[in-house]
Structure formats: structure tokens, C-alpha cells
Image (cartoon, grey):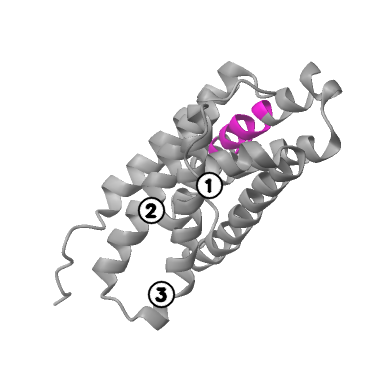
Amino acid sequence: MTANRRGLARSILIWAGLGLIVLVPVGAAAASPLLAWREPVYIIAGFAGVIAMALLLFQPLLAAGYLPGLPPMRGRRLHVWLGISLVIAVVVHVAGLWITSPPDVVDALLFVSPTPFSLWGVIAMWAVFGAALLAGLRRRLRLPLRVWRMGHTALVAIVVMGSVIHAMLVEGTMETLSKALLCGVVLLGTAKVVIDRRAWARRRPAR
């Protein structure tokens, strides 16, 4: 097998694996019998949360250029658009829950909810907004690149940790094993990118 064919086979395996990791929990959630008792708004809100978790899988990989077949510039543009999509998914998720049960959402936002998963969800939500805002204001803030990277990386780490804990604590339409696999891969992928890129390290100027 030539090097080109090996590279193509590797790319196909990577994309197929990522696709399965995302599609299996989404399919399991769609087939959940619990949906029969839920209102359409609640179902949309729930699936927005599932989509948000799926986007978290791809975001760090796109930022680091780890996804095969994507030129760096295209990967960065896709990273930006998926970041916007992530914010929209979070807003839809929270808005849908607000429509179906305003008191629960108020308690969560005030950090007085008796359910721990709500607290972690709110922490992740604010971190998503913070990371998106920091990315959008990058040029206007005129922060040193190292400082900006450290801030963005810290917020992303909070997003991932908060989202994973939130998802694992929720007993809903997502199937447990496929959800755990998705959350585990999101954690590992994000950790690898953070360690590899080392936002906290000083970059030596090129000679």
C-alpha cells in the first residue's frame, strides 16, 4: 500500500470513528421511549444539548488542525462557525428548558438548584459565552497572544469539564454507554490539544 493510500485509509478511519462517536448517542437519544412523554419544546431543548456536546468534540481538534483532509485555514474558519453554532445550541437548550420549566432554570441560574447537574450546566454555559466573547473581541482587546490563549484555553477547559459532568449526571434520553464514550473522547481530545499547544508556554521568536 502506498503512502497516499495509507493516508487516505487513516483519514477515512478517523472520520468514520468520529462520526460513530457522535451519531450513536444521537440515534440512541432519538429512539428513547422517554420522548413519548415530552413536549416538542423540551425535545428540541434536549437535542440542542446533545448537539452542543457533539460540537465540543470537534472544536479543539479543528483549532489544533488535527482533523485530516482539512487545510489549516479552512479548519480555523470551520472552528469559528462551529463556535457560533455551539453558542446557538446552548441558547436553544436553555431557552427550551426555560419555556417548559421557568422556576427550575431560575434556580439553576441563581445556583440554588437542588440538582447538581444544573449547577454544572450553568457553569459550562457561562464559560461558553465567555470563550465566545473573548474570541470575538480578540482584536479589540489587543491582549498579548499568550495572555489571550491562556484565557481562552482556561474557559474552554471549564466548558468541557462542566459539560461532561452535566451530561453524565443527567438521567435523560441519552443512552449511558454511548454518552460516556462521547464524553470520554471529548475530554481526551481537549486534553491532548491543551497539552500539545501549551498556551501557557512562552513562544521563542523565530530566528
Q: What stretch of residues is rendered in magenta?
A: 14-25
**Where is the C terminus found, in terms of image quarters?**
bottom left
**Residue beneath disc 3:** 138
User: Which SS class for mark 1?
Assistant: helix
Mark 3: few/some/many CA within 10 Å (<14, 14-19, 20+) = some
Relative to 74, does residue 197 appear above or below in the rendering?
above
Q: Which mark is residue 58?
A: 1
Front-lying residue, 13 or 111: 111
Question: Would residue 67 appear left or right of 206 to someone viewing this image?
Answer: right
Q: Helix or strand or loop: what does disc 2 sit on? A: helix
Expressed as whole percent of the image width and height from the top left, the position of residue 126 reads 48, 52
Dot label at residue 155: 2
Question: Residue visible at 59% across and 53% down?
Answer: 86
Q: Earlier in the sequence, mark 3 or mark 2?
A: 3
Q: Position of residue 9 (x, y in %)?
A: 55, 38
Q: Pick the residue in front: 59 or 151.
A: 151
Mark 1 or mark 3, which is nearer to you?
Answer: 3
Can the viewer see residue 1? no
In the drawing, what numbered circle is on residue 43?
none
Please tell me which residue is depicted at 65% across the width and 50% down the height of the picture.
89
